[in-house]
Amino acid sequence: MHLLIIISLASAISPLVVSARGTLGFSIGARRPDHRCKTIADYEADFDALKNKAGSTIVRTYSVIDVNVPEYTCETAATILPAAKSKNFKVILGLGADTQEHYDSEKAALDPVLTSEYAPYVYALVTGSESLYRNISAQELLPRINDTKVVFGKRVPRIGIVDSWNKFQDGTAHEILTSGVPTFLYAEISHRLITTRDITDATETYLDDLQQAFSHIQDIVGLDTVEIWNGETGWPGDGGSNHGKAQASTLNEEKFFKTGVCAALAWGINVFYFEAFDESWKPKSTGDNGEQGDETHWGSFTDSRMPKFSLNC
């Protein structure tokens, strides 16, 4: 889990909503609770829930093809875009790019899907997911981002990357930032900056991190040319794993949403919440400390699309 900042360097591109208030989006998974792939109808039902209960009409995905359960390979882009058209949603699509082979397969799968019928519903394409953090060099990643721009740039005007905030801060991403290639950036701040804190400190930490991160990146790319999204911030609900002083509970999740996310939206910051729905199919994950943790209870909705709390600010 990470806290993301999405930045557009293209001053000619208007933000999704021109408003003093920020826009709320959600990260969304590709699988049903039984770990099988979502259908178009599943995504349509997801979108109905998000719009009706949260007023949201934008989501982000992590890959064009989801292979997390090998026996059920999900063609995410091909399935979610018809639903987006049907429900008038926008989607930020991720393309895996940790290896050239992975990137080539993602690109090949997306190309026939991104037609004139569905391209208007793609808000941005993001090449790579924490690639620099996973020790892929900027020199290796930049040609893949540029290739995405060459292949898809006329169909989708926003092309970018997602990576750990420290990789932007320590200069690792400098070659990419100054290349003029990406028009969209996701700069991640470790989610542990928030979720190792007690809930009483979480909002202050969250908003302070946002302010520092935004100021630093704006110093690099300029104040008049950036579109900033904060995404993948959230809190584990009942049944989730504790992280340090942070206690997993739906009550704490609601408090963080109401005091943190709502405050950021009121500031005019666009926020992606992690995540839309619980993903009960997920296995336990192993953290850097070697401990196993639950990742199935981060949703603001249950896996049956019931909101856990009011998502109105």
Image (spheres, rainbow, N blue to C red):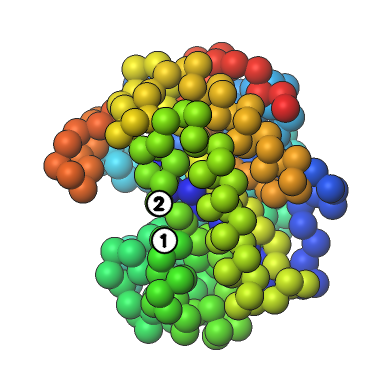
Residue 164 placed where, x, y %?
41, 61
The residue at which mark 2 appears reads as: 190
Q: For the C terminus, which image quadrant?
A: top right
Residue 5 placed where, x, y %?
56, 56
Q: Which amino acid lies under the numbered mark 1 shown in the image of this protein?
A: Ser
Residue drawn at point x = 54 percent, y = 78 percent: 177
Label 2 or label 1, whichever comes before in sequence order: 1
The dot on residue 100 is none
Q: Which amino acid lies under the numbered mark 2 shown in the image of this protein?
A: Ser
The residue at which mark 1 appears reads as: 164
Q: Secondary structure at mark 1?
A: strand
Q: Is residue 313 left or right of residue 83?
A: right
- Residue 97's place in the image compared with 37, above or below, is below
Q: Badge 1 local density, few (<14 within 10 Å), some, or many (20+)?
A: many
Q: Is residue 127 left or right of residue 125?
A: left
- Residue 108's place in the image compared with 69, above or below, is below
Image quadrant assignment for residue 7:
bottom right
Residue 186 placed where, x, y %?
53, 60
- Which one is nearer the viewer's eye here, 288 or 176? 288
